[in-house]
Amino acid sequence: MIVVEDIHKHFGGFHAVDGATMSIKEGSITGLIGPNGAGKTTLFNVIAGVLKPTSGRVTMLGEDITGLPPHELFHKGLLRTFQIAHEFSSMSCRENLMMVPGGQSGETLWNTWFGRKRIANEERALRAKADEVLEFLTISHLADHKAGQVSGGQKKLLELGRTMMVDARIVFLDEVGAGVNRTLLNTIADAILRLNTERGYTFVVIEHDMDFIGKICDPVICMAEGKVLAQGTLAEIKANEQVIEAYLGTGLKNKDQLEAGA
Amino acid sequence: MDFLNAIVALSNFVLVPAIAYGSQLALGALGVTLIYGILRFSNFAHGDTMAFGAMITILVTWWMQSAGINLGPLPTALLALPFGILGCVAMLLLTDRLIYRFYREQKAKPVILVIVSMGVMFIMNGIVRFIIGPNDQRFADGERFLISAREFKAMTGLSEGLAIRTSSVITVVVAVIAVALLFWFLNRTRTGKSMRAYSDNEDLALLSGINPERVVMVTWLIVAALATVAGVLYGLDKSFKPFTYFQLLLPIFASAIVGGLGNPLGAITGGFVIAFSEVTITYAWKKVANYVLPESIAPDGLAQLLSTDYKFAVSFVILLIVLLFKPTGLFKGKAV
Ligand SMILES: Nc1ncnc2c1ncn2[C@@H]1O[C@H](COP(=O)(O)OP(=O)(O)OP(=O)(O)O)[C@@H](O)[C@H]1O
Ligand SMILES: [Mg+2]
């Protein structure tokens, strides 16, 4: 569905992404793992149009989408969440969710004046939808709280909620699980699986939690130093020499974790 | 009786002028604050944008006057106002296309945009003077007073008169309508909400499918309308002279900053704070004091704290005081 061809992203002389090539299958939940600073977030930023790549190409269903601005990608059904949660701080959590579906009839000035009734109906539907999503994420009680004031983990949930407000095709999740407690982590994993099977979302998930990856992701891609090291099932990745050296390590602690996860 | 006279004198020389002036500053500051919140720079060209919009309105007003079109007791300028706004919209969209967009694509820092806006200011300034000249222009017509001082005295039997000028009333009415429309737009319409969202968190707004160019365009439209209305109201109330509009930049920025840059409610409050301070501090209180104080302690001099020549210093001092104690302004503004 998404093909990333030899993407380079340099910051000055530093090669944050250094010739990454990968292809994401439609309907898959692909895990993206790698040590801190491997260039995972930077790659997301390039795909999502926030950063222009130094060189390389990204295509979506065969169409070249390299360097398209984020709002156009949004309308093509490509969504992403931020590693550091973003929110419209002065709006309530519900309003935050209701902001997402762009390009409705309310968007033209003409409609603002003459299509009041239709807009009111749309707003009502949107509100119901937002409440549904909040309910699903177990944060209904925060609906009217200012999004700037909820906790870090709750902001993460809101990030995920945002992707549920529209019919996305592919969603890039950047560590949605970080800072979220275990029970909620399972809820999130279930949400991702459901969106995948019921609504046909394709996911690319960055995560450092191997249990989480193991539970939902197939295949898994491992990046290090801006390059793709390996791609395969989690078991294959875990057995991969290069991956062990670069990421999973051979230290005692990691070894335990490896065996526990496998 | 003396007390009533004091109140009337106070209203006549302080309250009414300050409310009118405050409304004008508030409209100006709203424009500045919107640009700061959404386009993320301090627009030094705002005073001259007001002058440009007012100039177009004046030219159309003159044409209407010569063609015999008028609004009876109301100034013809009100009829010409929509044309002024359109002219100003065209001007701002053109500057955006030719100048600001380039810097936006470069993701230029706010400080660079500020300098750029100074360049735009000089150009607009030149254009206005080139077209209409640097001198005072009169374009007000219709009834000058709603109530003149003489009528008021005859009506009430007081020795002090309260003159209410048509322009003051129009200023307040138009300002209230403009502000109501603006807030309705920002809080109720989807486009308005997307502007607030964009101002709040640009990255997230983009990833929520909000088209930044559209937000920028709508912002300029609103700014053009606000600036023209502010410019015309000020011109009707005082007079139109390009240089005064440049000078207005200081109290307007003071208003926006005092209220909290980027916060529309703050801009309005700031406008009135500055206007009331300026007017009360430069007003000669002798008359009012003579009415309310016993003769023994009534002032001999004018009881004027500061000569009107120094009125701009007032904005400056208030600005300093607010920034010292509340750096984000009275209402919480935003930092770029
Ligand atoms: N805007 C930038 N300017 C300069 N260097 C940057 C910039 N953004 C990222 N980098 C560098 O690029 C490298 C990759 O960063 P990136 O955020 O993509 O890592 P990551 O794989 O997401 O790591 P983590 O797991 O910690 O989130 C880092 O070394 C970082 O310092
Ligand atoms: Mg990251």
Image (cartoon, rainbow, N blue to C red):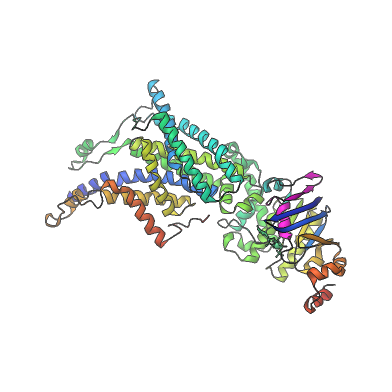
As drawn, A206 above or below B259: below
Q: Residue at x 39, y 49 (%)?
A: B271
Rendered image quadrant of residue A183: bottom right
Q: Which residues are magenta?
A: A39-64
Rendered image quadrant of residue A130: bottom right
* Left or right relative to A188: residue A117: left
Q: Position of residue B38 (x, y in %)?
A: 54, 48
Using the rendered image of the protein, determine whether residue A36 is visible from the camera's viewpoint. yes
As drawn, B113 above or below A233: above
Q: Position of residue B324 (x, y in %)?
A: 40, 61
Using the rendered image of the protein, determine whether residue A167 is visible from the camera's viewpoint. no
Count of residue discs: 0
The residue at the far top in this view is: B67
* Residue B72 vs residue B117, the one in the foreground: B117
* Residue B270 vs residue A96, the one in the foreground: B270
Q: Position of residue B23 (x, y in %)?
A: 38, 44
Q: Residue at x 82, y 55 (%)?
A: A22
Q: Answer whether residue A53 is magenta in the image.
A: yes
The residue at the far front in this view is: A13
Q: Quadrant of ligand 2?
A: bottom right
